[in-house]
Image (cartoon, rainbow, N blue to C red):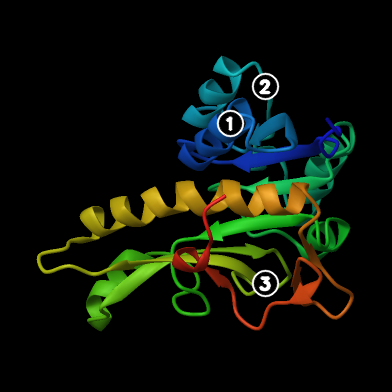
C-alpha cells in the first residue's frame, strides 16, 4: 500500500468554546485529515476550546491581547509564537481578533477562516439576526482563505440551510453551526491533501482548476 500524504502541521487560533476545533480534532482522530494539530492558541485564558485541546493531547498557549498596547504588537508576538510550531496552515476557529495586514501577509495562502453567512453577504458580526431582519429564505456558512479584507478572502466551500418559519437567531445559528462542523474539516482535508490551494492570481484552485464559485455542500460526491 502506498503511503498517504505527509501530515500538514496546523495551528488553530480560538477565542471561545472551540466547537469547530472539536470538529477538526474528531476528524483528525478518525483518520480523515492528513493534518497534525500542533498547537491551539487563544487570546482568552477562559476559552473552553483550550480544555478541548488539552483533552486531545494538543499543546495549548494563551496570548492575551490585553498584554499588548497595539494590534500590531500583539500580532507580531502571535506570529513569533506560531513560528516555533512551524505551521503549514493556520486555522481561525472563532478567533475574535481582526488581524493586521502584516500578519495576514505572513501566512498568505496558508490561513483559513469560517464565517457564519453565505459570503459575500453579511460580513462581520450578528449574521443570524441580520439574515432574519432581511427576511432571507436561506442562510449558511463559508470557509475562505484569509486576506486583508475582513471576511473577504476567496471562498472554498459553502453550506446552505433554509430559514424556517418560527426561526429565531439561536435556533438558526445552531443549524448553521452543524454545517460548519461538516465543511471546515472537509476544506482542511482538501488543503492538507494538496487538492486546494490559492494561486498567484488569488484564485482558489481545486484539483488543478480554478473555482468560479465556492463548492456547495450538496454538490460534493460521496467518497
* Whole-number angstrom distance, CA of label 3 to CA of label 2: 28 Å
Q: Secondary structure at mark 2?
A: loop
| Residue 95 visible | no
Residue at screen point 45% across, 36% down:
17
Give the left or right position of residue 125, taking residue 175 as reference: right
Residue 38 image point, x, y percent: 76, 29
| Residue 186 visible | yes
Quarter assignment of residue 44: top right
The disc, 3 or 1, on the residue closer to the chain's N-terminal end is: 1
* Whole-number angstrom distance, CA of label 2 to CA of label 1: 9 Å
Say how many tags the image has.
3
Residue at screen point 63% across, 54% down:
187
Examine the rendered structure and indicate whether residue 96 appears above or below residue 123.
above
The residue pinned by badge 2 equals 58
Q: Marks 3 and 1: CB-CB under 8 Å?
A: no
Residue at screen point 59% across, 18% down:
54
**Front residue of 145 and 156:** 156
Quarter assignment of residue 117: bottom left
Residue at screen point 67% across, 34% down:
41
Q: Marks 2 and 1: CB-CB under 8 Å?
A: yes
* Whole-number angstrom distance, CA of label 3 to CA of label 1: 25 Å
Examine the rendered structure and indicate whether residue 94 appears above or below residue 81.
below
Q: Secondary structure at mark 3?
A: loop
The residue pinned by badge 1 equals 25
Q: Secondary structure at mark 1?
A: helix
Residue 168 image point, x, y percent: 18, 61
Residue 73 image point, x, y percent: 80, 49
Residue 80 image point, x, y percent: 87, 40
The disc, 2 or 1, on the residue closer to the chain's N-terminal end is: 1
Location of the N terminus by quadrant is top right
The residue pinned by badge 3 equals 153
Amino acid at each position: 500500500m502506498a503511503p498517504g500524504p505527509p501530515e500538514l502541521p496546523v495551528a488553530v487560533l480560538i477565542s471561545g468554546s472551540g466547537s469547530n476545533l472539536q470538529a477538526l480534532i474528531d476528524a483528525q482522530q478518525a483518520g480523515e485529515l492528513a493534518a497534525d494539530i500542533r498547537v491551539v492558541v487563544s487570546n482568552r485564558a477562559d476559552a473552553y476550546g483550550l480544555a478541548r485541546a488539552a483533552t486531545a493531547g494538543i499543546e495549548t498557549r494563551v496570548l492575551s491581547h490585553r498584554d499588548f498596547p497595539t494590534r500590531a504588537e500583539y500580532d507580531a508576538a502571535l506570529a513569533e509564537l506560531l513560528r516555533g510550531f512551524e505551521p503549514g496552515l493556520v486555522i481561525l476557529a472563532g478567533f475574535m481578533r481582526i488581524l493586521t495586514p502584516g500578519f495576514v501577509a505572513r501566512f498568505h495562502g496558508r490561513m483559513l477562516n469560517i464565517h457564519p453567512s453565505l459570503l459575500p453577504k453579511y460580513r462581520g458580526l450578528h449574521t443570524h439576526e441580520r439574515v432574519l431582519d432581511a427576511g432571507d429564505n436561506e442562510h449558511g456558512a463559508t470557509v475562505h482563505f484569509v486576506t486583508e479584507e475582513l471576511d473577504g478572502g476567496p471562498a472554498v466551500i459553502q453550506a446552505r440551510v433554509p430559514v424556517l418559519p418560527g426561526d429565531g437567531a439561536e435556533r438558526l445559528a445552531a443549524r448553521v453551526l452543524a454545517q460548519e462542523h461538516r465543511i471546515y474539516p472537509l476544506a482542511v482535508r482538501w488543503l492538507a491533501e494538496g487538492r486546494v490551494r490559492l494561486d498567484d492570481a488569488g484564485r482558489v484552485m481545486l484539483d488543478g482548476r480554478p473555482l468560479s464559485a465556492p463548492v456547495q455542500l450538496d454538490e460534493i460526491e460521496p467518497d
